[in-house]
Amino acid sequence: MLSIVISMVVIVVVAGVVVTFVAFPHRGAEVPGAPWLGDGMSRAVDILPTLDNTSSDDTAEADKRSA
């Protein structure tokens, strides 16, 4: 029972962090009441590797192959 409660608390905390990031720092706004949280999230995103999905060349080639 305790492991289920701990798991659910962790899930809710992670979901809250994701919602907070999408609602504020991702849009360029500060988190009200906790600007340090937004700064930390922005720094973490800058450090983490991301996928470059802005390249249209790869998409055009994939479309040609599937047609």
Image (cartoon, grey):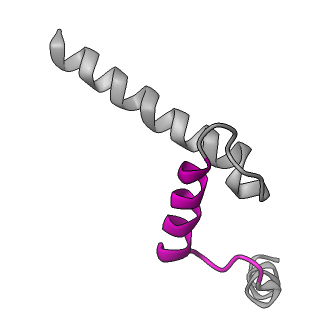
59 horizontally vs 21: left or right: right
> Which residue is pictured at 28% across the width and 25% down the height?
7
Residue 18 % position (x, y):
56, 43
Is residue 41 depicted above or below 6 in this figure? below
For the C terminus, the image quarter is bottom right
Quadrant of image for the N terminus:
top left
Front residue of this view, candidates 27 and 34 = 34
Residue at 53% x, 68% y: name it: 43
29 left or right of 25?
right
Name the image quarter holding residue 31.
top right
Query: Is 37 part of what is drawn in magenta?
Result: yes
Location of residue 25 with respect to 11 vertically, above or below? below
The stretch in magenta equals: 35-54
Pick whichever, 15 or 67, lies toward us.
Answer: 15
Q: Which secondary structure is most common in the magenta stretch?
A: helix
Residue 62: quadrant of the picture: bottom right
Residue 51 visible somewhere in the drawing: yes
Percent of width and height locating residue 27? 78, 55
Q: Position of residue 32 (x, y in %)?
A: 69, 39
Q: Does residue 61 appear left or right of residue 3 in this picture? A: right
Residue at point 77% right, 80% down? 54
The front one of 20 and 35 is 35
Would residue 27 appear left or right of 5 to someone viewing this image? right
Work out whether residue 49 can be spotted: no
Can you give x and y, in whole percent of width and height, for residue 4 in the image? 24, 17
Q: Residue furthest left?
A: 2
For residue 46: magenta? Answer: yes
Q: Vertical placement of 5 versus 16: above or below?
A: above
What is the tally of numbered marks visible in this picture? Answer: 0
